[in-house]
Amino acid sequence: MLTHAAEDYLKSIYKLQEKGGKVSTGILAEYLDVKPASATGMVKKLKTMKLVRYERYRGVTLTDAGKAIALEIIRHHRLLELYLFTALGVPWDGVHDEAEKLEHVISEDVEARMDEFLGYPTADPHGAPIPDKNGVVTRTASIPMTDLQDGQSCVVAEVSDNDSALLRHIGSFNLYPGTAFSVIEVAPFEGPFTIDIAGQQVVIGREVAKQIFVDKVQDPDNV
Amino acid sequence: MLTHAAEDYLKSIYKLQEKGGKVSTGILAEYLDVKPASATGMVKKLKTMKLVRYERYRGVTLTDAGKAIALEIIRHHRLLELYLFTALGVPWDGVHDEAEKLEHVISEDVEARMDEFLGYPTADPHGAPIPDKNGVVTRTASIPMTDLQDGQSCVVAEVSDNDSALLRHIGSFNLYPGTAFSVIEVAPFEGPFTIDIAGQQVVIGREVAKQIFVDKVQDPDNV
DNA sequence: TATATAATTTAGCCATGCCTAAATTAGTTT
DNA sequence: AAACTAATTTAGGCATGGCTAAATTATATA
Ligand SMILES: [Mn+2]
Ligand SMILES: [Mn+2]
Ligand SMILES: [Mn+2]
Ligand SMILES: [Mn+2]
């Protein structure tokens, strides 16, 4: 078994390489809130374990073995988030930190039991996909809310789960995954979004909108 | 926050000093499956943190601060065992190892939510008392099954939870806490116990009987 | 093409928590 | 009282995973 630290590195490399191929040790260090020298050190260890491809100054990528472990940990994390949310009522801005610690520690048996209890779910409380038992991820092609135009109708697909204050804020507008809304107005000059959620008019700043991902819907009212 | 290792040491010192006052570093090392030198090292660290009283060659005891932490971890452990057993159906011979890892990692919030879900329970699946939120333990005065005489009726109160093969064995006789049985015969010369559980006749070896603790009941059939 | 800048790596250090082997102490036996 | 034995502690080492400071390399700029 790997150490918690190694698992977190693999998970982070996976996430970073999803949006941008090779991952520099600097970016990795920043993401993990660690100094670059520490990231370099761990990456070298992961290389000797053949979990990572790495050449100095050239960045890191996961091998198939490394990716499998990363997905396993991500599966733990997201199942745990949903389990804590659903079974114990932990608020959606609290589940991330809790899962961050538990993910390294639960057995495959408990993983399977949570999966069954939850009915083999495919997304966590923030809308992120839960890799299946074999590490297969079904991605949805959601777009950032900031790409929306006036009048567009859509459904919230996913929300960034890193910042719990942000989640509380987004939750206060009821913008959970699955919630439908339509854009009333996008203010010019990088301005805020005015939207309609279930008849309620709400203003969402651009920085917040960047963290919200949606699926467009054909709006029958708007033809 | 303490390290996992330090928490496990405090928990172990607590359990060992329950039956026998001061705890030697040797006993502690054996209990934790660690070399005596390692136990001495950790005990010195715990002393600088004022969690433990210790003088070389003289044994260790917990301070009030150390005892409070030990009880907090024991509470986590036992609540987790019962939660895993009740909510996720983890078999009673599996909950100990799982809880051993989770106990260091759950938040006070999750602790409180499990407690509520379980209806503020007072015993874990093996019958061990769960300290309350303030660290108060309500001990029961159970006796080892080996103290029973022929004809005695009793109820299982508690079973050792260290050895999971033993638990499977005991479970195969349905000797869970709460189960009533009566002694048919105690074979002489340190022999086995023949007992009656719900009409079924079962033979229990002495080594197993030592690990089972019971409460005597006045048996109306036997007057 | 040379040089400046920024990123990355190396070197060396620290804390934790384990280990083995050697030294010390306590307690018991003669 | 001395000697022996068993328990305990000390000394020194190793792996992990951080850190800082200095050296190196890549890249952009002149
Ligand atoms: Mn983690
Ligand atoms: Mn999430
Ligand atoms: Mn533990
Ligand atoms: Mn137990």
Image: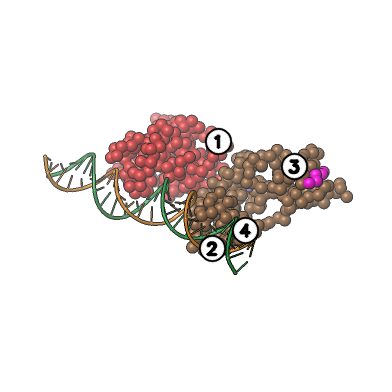
Chain colours: A brown, B red, C green, D orange
Point out the stretch of residues depicted in magenta: A183-189
> What is the chain letter for disc 3?
A
Residue that label 2 marks: A56
Image x and y of residue B84, in percent? 53, 44
Q: Earlier in the sequence, mark 4 or mark 2?
A: 4
Q: Quadrant of residue A22?
A: bottom right
Q: Earlier in the sequence, mark 2 or mark 3?
A: 2
Disc marking residue B112: 1
> What is the chain letter for disc 4?
A
> Do the residues bearing badges 1 and 3 touch, measured as CB atoms within 8 Å?
no
Q: Quadrant of residue A53?
A: bottom right
Residue that label 3 marks: A204
Residue B73 appears left or right of A208: left
The answer for how far apart the CA atoms under marks 4 and 3 are is: 29 Å
Disc marking residue A17: 4
Instruction: Name the residue rendered at 38%, 46% in the picture.
Output: B32
**Callout in the foreground (4, 2):** 2
Q: Inspect the image, locate mark 1, and give the three-letter code of the amino acid beneath it.
A: Ala
The answer for how far apart the CA atoms under marks 2 and 3 are is: 43 Å
Q: Is residue A213 magenta?
A: no
> What is the chain letter for disc 2?
A
Image x and y of residue B42, in percent? 37, 43
